[in-house]
């Protein structure tokens, strides 16, 4: 018997398929367009409604794929799909319907170019939002379309057809991006799922509570619940269950301090009223989700050079004198994805590949998952995984943050759906080839300001938060920014064997290795919203 | 170090160096009282004074931080309404403020209630006063995190007190403004013993009109340095509930009422300090003991059109009282720098955006301020007997974002009424009196919260 309160029934025919579950395809085309005439835009949208993929199909596909892997121990061949999703900026929604004005999230309303300041982007120079080819105030699109598939030829053919039809309908194409899993370029399977700095990406995603039918859970795998009710329940080890309202509007939210308790959903409505003054969107925003897009250019050579330079600061006897060791401390994982918490001294590719083990750790509770990879040490002070390590900055797991109990971190989780773009450089390269490469970052959440922008502005870009001490903490050196310092320099503590060494920035503009080159804040509407409101 | 230094090591007492000794005695007495107060539990064996560390090695540390907006308000009312309510001054004698806190009025010699202003409904050790012009536009917001104990110490030199008030608040401050005009009695709402406190005419009055108007120092009964030190001591003990260690929130603070359970500050400090204790450390607070504004998220602030503000944290958010290295801020002012215009017109703080919304309340800015203090730890603490928790936390059935007390083992998923927080362990009042220097009038008795 599934607890209906703990597992809300999800509208699988309404929620677009990239939000929960996610497309997770190796080849994706991202198209940004602006409407010409409104009638032709609506007609264009109507004619494309059937192309949109919803959760039912994605969920069934994932189940079938997992069943195959369980049965045969291997990825299925030939189980391919071509899926699509659509989303709109606040500006775009406003062209289609007047009650789009009921969206109250100011970050969404003002858009990613404004949000750029909040997340600490440079405000002048080539990476400032006003220079973005897509997403600057002058080039903010109305609509975002994504085509994802297993076959790159199919994706690009479909994108070309889409672009043609869109232009016929009077849409102006602001930009098109093609993302590919990095294994595509030199057929190097070792790169599968890795981003350009070489690290396996997207390992830790929250598990979402909910049922896809009366009797089937969205996330099938469940750990036995800890008898301590103040601890979350987990799907995979290390993957806490979060109420769907944190990602999809209209569903129960997480209570702040009690992870298994729901809080009432965000209020949606026709109009603010005395009884419901704080609506966050119109009634048709139900089953929708906010999407953040950031085009992040990565300077791989500069990153590698930074690691080499920093390693030289440590004595030869210190493991930190190895660039790969420092890299693991900035990220919190080795390149294979193995977390430093479970493999402190060196990478462990077998662990990195094992999805049942590579995320099975906490910081405050030692334990042994008995999965063959050993016991997990206690690391409340950040001696093994530094407080400033990227994965720890955005998710302090079972350690309390400045917001309060560790459970509050569950309200800050996001669903990441990004994909790299551009061909990779050889591993460890310190010479740039001038090519544009990086990450098409995408994430879904119920509130852009309290989730995505919060993670950037309040945690990654903070010297102190979520957690620090006199010799621990500091900025996220991987993706954090410091708009306050004139040179935008950041530093963090990486504990050496017996003392902490402060990795300084040596006056180098660290943002040289991740820079924003485009962005957008979108809303991903439900089927009903698309059919009955936006395309009417 | 051989003495307790003033918060942020400020040098007000250079004008009267005997006050350095008075301050040291004040804080030292807190440590003594804590040691003596723990009833059966023999004075918190893992807690030490930073002046008497158990070993001379460099200590480990933790810097618990929290946002300056009262969580008791945002959890109950949401961020926007919480920020609006936080600006309120609550008169003494109000039966229930918005956090459910109640207080009794000051009484005159005849036992009749007499006006003595009130307290700011801001209980994360950060308080502020919003100044508006006649059209309601905000011209400045003043922030303070200085405790009443320090200002009680300052007040033993009336000239120094006046000079500081005149420097930081207004040249118009008169000596008579800062003292009780008549004898009064009062019961500190946070004093478990509810003992009557006596104030004489001429004693320093922490709720004087200038402090109320311009936030010279903290006024909320929960915002005392003594409370923080007590909290650290309580967090140095180890706790258990029905066979399992308790060291995370919400249960850590609910366990024996270690601080106020619905605040941000107390639970965060408790969990950081208790984490150090769980690792087998002796713990304390770093000298100088204080709570500070450590940071402000400048990226949340923008000009009316959303453009970034040039030099926000230097020119707009001014540090008026802080450590020499400017890292620890005690007093700050948010105002438009002189000469800054916006499209040729005067600019007001209420024109600026905070998180994309015009600033209408001080609480919006407080939410962007990171508060913190510094806990220290030394290894080698002896094993402690774990103390059994008397309570656990459950979500309030009316609002799951609010924590209420419940008996250990309660199934929180079933609705239940909140338990009254009545603790069985001996409770002692940790009020203390700063000993007045010879020839000077005794001033304020400092109220310290304790729930042992």
Image: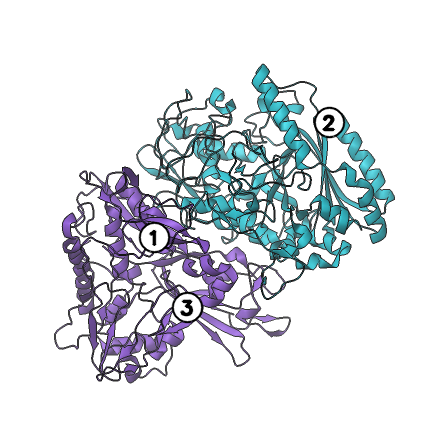
Chain colours: A cyan, B purple
Looking at the image, which residue is at 61% across and 60% down? B307
Q: CA distance from mark 3 to mark 2?
A: 58 Å
Q: Quadrant of residue B95?
A: bottom left
* Residue B348 pos. (x, y %): 55, 72
* Residue B98 pos. (x, y %): 42, 66
Which residue does the numbered mark 2 point to in the structure image? A152
Query: Could you tell whether A474 is left or right of A200 in the image?
Result: left
Q: Earlier in the sequence, mark 1 or mark 3?
A: 3
Which residue does the numbered mark 3 point to in the structure image? B128
Query: Could you tell whether A360 is left or right of A509 in the image?
Result: left
Q: CA distance from mark 1 to mark 3?
A: 30 Å
Which residue does the numbered mark 1 point to in the structure image? B405
Q: CA distance from mark 2 to mark 1?
A: 57 Å
Relative to the observer, which residue lies in front, B362 or A475? B362
Is residue A163 depicted above or below A458 in this figure? Answer: above
- The chain ID associated with circle 3 is B
Q: Secondary structure at mark 3?
A: strand
Please indicate, yes or no, whether residue A138 appears anywhere in the rendered image. Answer: no
């Amino acid at each position: 018997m599934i607890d209906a309160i703990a597992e809300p029934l999800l509208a699988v025919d309404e929620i677009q398929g990239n939000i929960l579950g996610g497309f997770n395809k190796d080849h994706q085309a991202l198209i940004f367009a602006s409407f010409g005439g409104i009638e032709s835009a609506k007609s264009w949208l109507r004619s494309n409604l059937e192309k949109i993929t919803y959760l039912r199909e994605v969920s069934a596909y994932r189940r079938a794929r997992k069943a195959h892997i369980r049965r045969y121990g291997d990825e299925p061949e030939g189980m391919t799909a071509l899926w699509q999703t659509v989303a709109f900026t606040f500006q775009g929604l406003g062209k289609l319907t007047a009650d789009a004005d009921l969206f109250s999230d100011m970050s969404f309303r003002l858009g990613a170019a404004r949000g750029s300041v909040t997340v600490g982007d440079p405000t002048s120079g080539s990476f400032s939002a006003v220079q973005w080819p897509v997403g600057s105030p002058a080039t903010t699109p109305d609509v975002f379309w994504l085509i994802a598939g297993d076959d790159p030829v199919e994706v690009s053919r479909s994108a070309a057809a889409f672009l043609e039809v869109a232009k016929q309908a009077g849409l102006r194409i602001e930009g098109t991006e093609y993302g590919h899993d990095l294994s595509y370029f030199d057929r190097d399977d070792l790169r599968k799922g890795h981003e350009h700095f070489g690290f396996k990406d997207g390992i830790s995603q929250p598990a979402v509570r909910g049922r896809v039918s009366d009797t089937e859970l969205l996330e099938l795998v469940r750990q036995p619940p800890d008898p301590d009710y103040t601890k979350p329940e987990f799907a995979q080890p290390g993957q806490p269950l979060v109420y769907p309202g944190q990602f999809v509007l209209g569903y129960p939210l997480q209570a702040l301090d009690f992870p298994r308790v729901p809080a009432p959903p965000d209020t949606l409505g026709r109009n603010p009223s005395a009884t419901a003054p704080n609506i966050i969107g119109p009634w048709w925003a139900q089953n929708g989700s906010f999407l953040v897009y950031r085009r992040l250019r990565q300077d791989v050579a500069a990153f590698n050079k930074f690691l080499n330079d920093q390693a030289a600061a440590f004595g030869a006897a210190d493991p930190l004198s190895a660039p790969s060791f420092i890299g693991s401390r900035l990220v919190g994982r080795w390149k294979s994805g193995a977390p430093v918490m479970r493999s402190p001294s060196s990478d462990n590719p077998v662990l990195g590949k094992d999805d049942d083990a590579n995320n099975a750790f906490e910081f405050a509770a030692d334990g042994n998952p008995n999965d063959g990879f050993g016991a997990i040490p206690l690391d409340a002070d950040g001696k093994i995984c530094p407080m400033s390590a990227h994965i720890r900055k955005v998710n302090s797991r079972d350690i309390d943050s400045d917001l309060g109990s560790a459970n509050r971190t569950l309200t800050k989780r996001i669903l990441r759906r990004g994909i790299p773009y551009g061909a990779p450089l050889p591993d460890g390269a310190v010479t740039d080839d001038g090519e544009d490469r990086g990450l098409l970052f995408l994430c879904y959440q119920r509130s852009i300001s309290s989730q995505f922008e919060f993670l950037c502005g309040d945690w990654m870009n903070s010297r102190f938060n979520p957690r620090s001490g006199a010799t621990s903490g500091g900025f996220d050196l991987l993706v954090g920014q410091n708009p306050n310092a004139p040179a935008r320099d950041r530093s963090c503590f990486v504990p050496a064997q017996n003392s902490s060494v402060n990795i300084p920035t040596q006056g180098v503009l660290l943002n040289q290795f991740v820079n924003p080159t485009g962005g957008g804040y979108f809303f991903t509407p439900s089927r009903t919203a698309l059919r009955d409101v936006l395309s009417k | 170090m051989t003495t307790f230094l003033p918060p942020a090591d400020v040098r007000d007492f250079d004008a009267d160096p005997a006050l350095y000794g008075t301050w040291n005695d004040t804080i030292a007495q807190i440590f003594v009282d804590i040691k003596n107060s723990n009833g059966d539990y023999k004075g918190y064996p893992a807690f030490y004074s930073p002046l008497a560390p158990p070993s001379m090695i460099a200590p480990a540390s933790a810097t618990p931080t929290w946002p300056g907006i009262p969580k008791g308000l945002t959890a109950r009312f949401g961020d926007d309404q919480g920020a609006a309510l936080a600006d309120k001054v609550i008169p003494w004698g109000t039966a229930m403020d918005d956090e459910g806190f109640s207080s009794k009025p000051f009484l005159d010699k005849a036992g009749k209630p007499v006006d003595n202003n009130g307290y700011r409904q801001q209980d994360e050790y950060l308080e502020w006063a919003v100044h508006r012009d006649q059209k309601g536009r905000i011209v400045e917001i003043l922030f303070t995190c200085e405790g009443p104990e320090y200002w009680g110490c300052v007040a033993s030199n009336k000239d120094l007190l006046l000079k500081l008030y005149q420097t930081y608040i207004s040249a118009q401050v008169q000596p008579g403004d800062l003292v009780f005009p008549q004898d009064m009695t009062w019961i500190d709402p946070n004093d478990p013993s509810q003992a009557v406190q006596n104030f004489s005419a001429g004693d320093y009055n922490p709720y004087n009109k200038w402090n109320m108007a311009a936030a010279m120092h903290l006024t909320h009964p929960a915002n005392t340095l003594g409370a923080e030190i007590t909290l650290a001591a309580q967090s140095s003990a180890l706790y258990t509930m029905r066979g399992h260690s308790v060291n995370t929130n919400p249960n850590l603070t609910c366990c024996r009422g270690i601080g106020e359970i619905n605040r941000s500050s107390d639970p965060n400090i408790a969990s950081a300090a208790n984490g150090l204790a769980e690792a087998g450390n002796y713990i304390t607070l770093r000298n100088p003991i204080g709570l500070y504004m450590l940071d402000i998220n400048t990226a949340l602030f923008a000009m009316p059109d959303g453009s970034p503000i040039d030099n926000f944290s230097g020119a707009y958010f001014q540090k008026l009282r802080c450590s020499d290295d400017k890292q620890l801020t005690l007093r700050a002012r948010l105002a438009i720098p002189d000469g800054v215009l916006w499209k040729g017109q005067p600019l007001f703080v209420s024109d600026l955006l905070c998180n994309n919304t015009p600033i209408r309340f001080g609480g919006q800015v407080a939410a962007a301020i990171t508060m913190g203090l510094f806990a220290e730890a030394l290894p080698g603490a002896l094993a402690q007997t774990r103390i059994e928790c008397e309570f656990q936390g459950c979500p309030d059935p009316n609002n799951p974002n609010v924590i209420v007390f419940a008996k250990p083992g309660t199934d929180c998923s079933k609705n239940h009424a909140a338990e009254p927080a009545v603790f069985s362990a001996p409770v002692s009042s940790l009020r203390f009196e700063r000993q007045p220097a010879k020839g000077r009038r005794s001033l304020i008795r400092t109220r310290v919260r304790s729930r042992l």
